[in-house]
Image (cartoon, coloured by chain):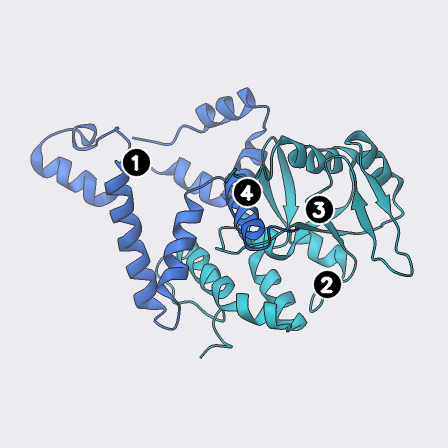
Amino acid sequence: MRLAPDKVRRLARARGLTLSEALRRARVSRNAFYHLARRATVVPRTVVALGTALGVPVAELLDEAPASPDQRAAALLREARRIHARNPQASFDNIWHTLWMLEQSPAERLRRSLIRGHAVSPDR
Amino acid sequence: MDTPSLLTDKEARLLQALVEEGVEFLVVGLAAAALQGAPAVTQDIDLWLRDLSDPRLRRALRRVGAVYIPRGPQNPPLLAGGDAGLFDIVVNMDGLRSFAQEARRALRIPVGAVEVPVLPLARVIASKRASDRPKDRAILPALEDALRVLRSRKHPGRLSRTAGRRRA
């Protein structure tokens, strides 16, 4: 499975964006994008090797259904633990809440921050 | 209790008007930190404006029924009326370089239909360190930890560098 720059360009255009604007919005550098576009496959080598070993196409190993809330929470917990292990001076709570905030859109992050802020000082 | 209606389309409209009129501004402070994922609580959205006398600012405010109130003997510069209720104007930022220098490194973050220029979290932390008020000191650990998370996602194999230097 390869990255299709033309498809990305077309999807960006359909949303009124140039490719550069879409990359900037995604905070992906042009270098990273074109590096990926040049690769024969964007699937991690481990998965390709597993497919080869089992004699099946890589697609058969993948599940397109989005992760369930439980799976997503478990993945975030693993990531939080990994980051905390590398940064033991940090607060696990802060790491965890940041990871959850990053699951939201920026507007939603700001909205939650404002709601909590006004709940603390409701007179404002 | 009703959930307060915050950051609705009304507020997004003001940001959109500022962007569309070409007003030079940055979202700064804890609103900037929250936009980047920091678990920070804030009561308003601080805007650092390059030039308060810019006629484009007046035009943008007029579009959303708001007005700019210049600094007076008793008041700092203010935005009032219309969709400006959640916004505060910041004139000086402690610990940062000039507006132009900081604006060059601003992030463009989508808020609703518009991308707004936002001070990067590392620079928010620098300004909070420089301000050094009790409320700034209180929030710094959460901001620094959020920066560790962002750096960890950007460079998964690398240990954090300076985010926590005050806490070591």
Rendered position, A15 above or below B14: above
Instruction: Determine the residue located farthest toward the front in the rendered image.
Output: B1
Residue at image mark 4: A111
Mark 3 → mark 1, Cα distance in angstroms: 47 Å
- Closer to viewer: mark 3 or mark 2: 3
Residue at image mark 3: B87
Where residue B51 appears, as percent x and y from the top left, is: 84, 50
Q: Amino acid at mark 4?
A: Arg
Report the chain shown in blue. A
Number of other residues with Cα within 10 Å of mark 2, as a class: few under 14, some 14 to 19, many 20 or more: some
Labels 2 & 4 near each other (Cβ < 8 A): no
- Closer to viewer: mark 2 or mark 4: 4
Q: Which disc is residue B93 wearing?
A: 2
Q: Chain of mark 2?
A: B
Labels 3 & 2 near each other (Cβ < 8 A): no
- Label 3 sits on a secondary structure element that is strand
Mark 2 → mark 4, Cα distance in angstroms: 23 Å
Number of other residues with Cα within 10 Å of mark 1, as a class: few under 14, some 14 to 19, many 20 or more: few
Q: Amino acid at mark 1?
A: Thr
- The quadrant in which the N terminus of chain A is found is top left
- Do discs 3 and 2 share a chain? yes
Mark 3 → mark 2, Cα distance in angstroms: 16 Å
- Do discs 3 and 1 share a chain? no
Q: Amino acid at mark 2?
A: Met
